[in-house]
Image (cartoon, grey):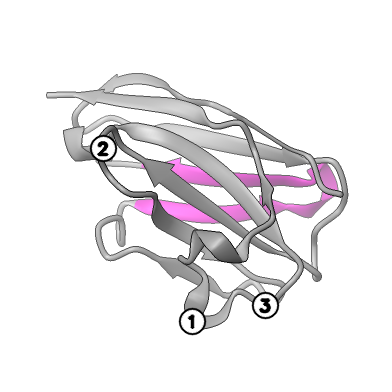
Amino acid sequence: QVQLVESGGGSVQAGGSLRLSCVASINTYGTYCMAWFRRAPGKEREGVAAIDSERSTSYADSVKGRFTISQDNAKNTLYLQMNSLKPEDTAMYYCAAEPWLCGASWADGDAYNYWGQGTQVTVSS
């Protein structure tokens, strides 16, 4: 059983930055695919970024070049650095974990069994 707790959300103007954190209850390094998802009001859940046990990263096209996913294994913490934020990035952001290698299905939320409670990001124009 893995417990995930996100933090770092908030309100920011367009062009600004935020860093989200997700603390895991266990050391997931080398064994888990860790990912960030988001859900905006009225929209489906979207995979934002993932990092696998081999440190390979994947990103949604909508965030490439603006967001960076990373891990601090000593702190059991996953990060999402979000730069050049846009109003369309407004959503609830969730951390997810699953003991697998991510792969081509990293953005499929149904593949993850462990989720955090979410942290709200609001970007104003």
In the image, residue 89 lies at what x, y percent?
27, 39
Q: Is residue 118 above or below residue 62?
A: above
Separation (CA) of disc 2 from disc 3: 29 Å
Query: Counting residues from the N terminus, which is met first, the one under dot 1 or under dot 2?
Result: 2
Of badges 2 and 3, nearer the viewer stands 3
The disc label shown at residue 122, or none: none
Q: Position of residue 103 (x, y in %)?
A: 56, 81
Q: Which residue is mark 2?
A: 85
Looking at the rendered structure, the kind of residue marked 1 is Ala
Q: Under tag 3, what secondary structure?
A: loop
Kindly identify the amino acid type of the residue bearing the numbered disc 3.
Leu
- Extreme-left residue of the structure: 125
Q: x, y percentage for residue 4?
A: 72, 39
Q: Residue at x 28, y 30 (%)?
A: 16
SS majority, magenta: strand
The answer to which quarter of the image holds residue 29 is bottom right
